[in-house]
Amino acid sequence: MKIIETVAEFRQEWANLKELESLSLGLVPTMGFLHEGHISLVKKSVSQNDVTAATIFVNPTQFGENEDFEDYPRDMKSDLDFLDCEGVDIVFVPSLEEMYPEGFETSINVGSIATRLEGKYRPGHFSGVATVVCKLLSICRPDRAYFGQKDAQQCAVIMALNRDLCLGSEIVVGETIRSSDGLALSSRNSYLSDSEREKALSLSSGLFAARKLWRSGENASDRLRSVVLNEILSGNSEVPVEIDYVSVADKNTFMEIDRIEEAGNAIILVAAKIGTTRLIDNVALV
Ligand code: PAF
């Protein structure tokens, strides 16, 4: 596995590989502190492409002022071991200066989809994500790029970005990977104490209960939202919980839906702070 730190080196390496034969490239962009969710994307890429590259870059522009950029968990050695074991060919680990050299002022405005839900609670977040992903796709020019469904709105933003700016990659969305008790895997789960982790399970159990109710014939969104809210707010946990939103939304526009008329078009999303850790999760209504 080759570890590369600069754009020029990455381009040279990929040009050398491609020179010998026509090869497809899969890209798995990450912020590191890898878990099974990332690894499932890597496995998908390795199985679908001749060459797989992963990136590890904790992108400051997608963090708000009072968010956890400084504290975001990092473990480069273990990440590189993980990626090597999975058969990744190239890892791009740019420095801050490489990605945002002096004079860098460009940012991408992804439009209305980025103003809802996560965009509303994390102003500027999607602009930061879109800018860095656009840059990574432009540097690496992958045939396919892989993102996880846990960040459903991020996936929609990246698809819009890729379509609107003709970036030319296929965007592949991998399923949310959960631990056996249902908690969606996230690098931020490492912040949770035992009691907070216990409380965090109410996010997925609330979503599963709402999906079950929908499957039994309930299509009024407010009833489904209530199920999730009740699940999160019930119980005697000492752990403070702050819910940002429980949303039943169109899976492409992320606009609220009152009634779910058609299977496959809606998604239930939740964002909440469990203690001081902000978590998101979602389930598609299928
Ligand atoms: O999902 C993430 O880890 C990040 O938002 C991404 C896509 C790597 C951009 O920094």
Image (spheres, rainbow, N blue to C red):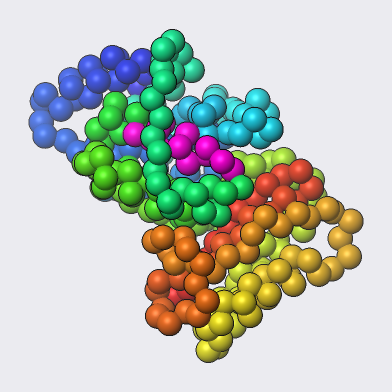
Residue occupying image coordinates x 48% and y 17%: 96
- Quadrant of residue 105 within the rendered picture: top left
Secondary structure character of the magenta stretch overall? helix
Left or right: 187 as drawn, with respect to 40 = right
Position in image of residue 46 (x %, y %): 32, 43
Between 258 and 233, the one lying in front of the other is 258
Left or right: 194 as drawn, with respect to 73 = right
Residue occupying image coordinates x 83% and y 53%: 240
- Image: 263 above or below 93: below
Position in image of residue 269 (x %, y %): 56, 62
- Quadrant of residue 83 within the rendered picture: top left
Position in image of residue 164 (x %, y %): 26, 45
Q: Which residue is situated farthest in the bottom direction here? A: 217
Left or right: 218 as drawn, with respect to 29 = right
Between 101 and 150, the one lying in front of the other is 101
Is any atom of residue 4 visible in this view?
A: yes
Quick check: is 143 in the magenta stretch?
no
Residue occupying image coordinates x 50% and y 72%: 257
Position in image of residue 170 (x %, y %): 26, 47
- Quadrant of the frame with the C terminus: bottom left
Quick check: is 133 in the magenta stretch?
yes
The range drawn in magenta is 122-134
- Quadrant of the frame with the N terminus: top left
Is any atom of residue 84 visible in this view?
A: no
Residue occupying image coordinates x 41% and y 12%: 103
Q: Which residue is situated farthest in the top direction here? A: 102
Q: How many marks?
A: 0
- Image: 204 above or below 138: below
